Amino acid sequence: MRTAVEQWLEIPSDAIQIISAPGFAPRLLIDGLPEPGFSVSHEAGLSLAAVNLHGAVGVDLMQVQTVPDWHAVALDYLGAEVASVLSGMPEPTRAVAFAKAWCRREAFLKLHGLGLEEWRTVGGLQGVGVEVALGEGMVGVVALGSVCADTGLSDFLCAGG
């Protein structure tokens, strides 16, 4: 991540500090700039990070897989509307759609500084979600506040590896 930010902003690596502690969201500090929004997600073999110089950001990625109790999980965490849409899909399509909906939910929770909660506790959250192309079998979503999305993406970095 440090290398990506260094190249993106054309600054020396010693001007970048990443603070990470178990149980807390990671922080990114860049000399001379206000603290940017920073979000990271990990899946076996891949990590995805996003930086927003103008506000909060959330990111999540997930390997597409069949979730045996997908309907109960969708009802609890994604809401009745999403669960209903997923119910009408054939299994291969549903697995991808479930992964996208889950990533969207997680990214929006991170955007708003919230942990994973059931839908009835924390319902729909405001912002703009953008899918990230990660290749076959992986899904990723970046969430930005609507004000940040209006400024364009020149002050936004998403890096995977």
Image (cartoon, rainbow, N blue to C red):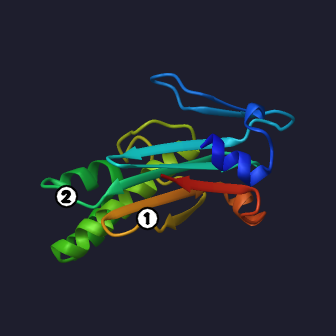
Report how far apart the C-alphas of labels 2 and 1 lie in the structure: 25 Å
Tell me what residue is drawn at x 60 percent, y 56 percent.
Answer: 158
Q: Residues within 10 Å of mark 2 (few under 14, many from 20)?
A: some
Residue at the right extreme, as displayed: 32
Q: Residues within 10 Å of mark 1 (few under 14, many from 20)?
A: some
- Closer to us: 158 or 123: 158
Query: Where is residue 157, by image quadrant?
Result: bottom right
- Closer to us: 57 or 42: 42
SS class, disc 2: helix
Residue at the left extreme, as displayed: 68
- Closer to us: 112 or 22: 22
- The residue beneath circle 2 is 71
Tell me what residue is drawn at x 78 percent, y 33 percent.
Answer: 15
Please tell me which of labels 2 and 1 falls first in the chain.
Answer: 2
Q: Is residue 135 above or below residue 62?
A: below
In the rendered image, the quadrant that contains the N terminus is top right
Q: Tell me the amino acid under the disc marked 1.
A: Leu
Residue 90 percent coordinates (x, y): 17, 77
Residue 126 visible from this viewpoint: no
Is 39 left, or right, of 11 in this rendering? left
Tell me what residue is drawn at x 83 percent, y 38 percent.
Answer: 33
- The residue beneath circle 1 is 134
Residue 2 percent coordinates (x, y): 64, 40
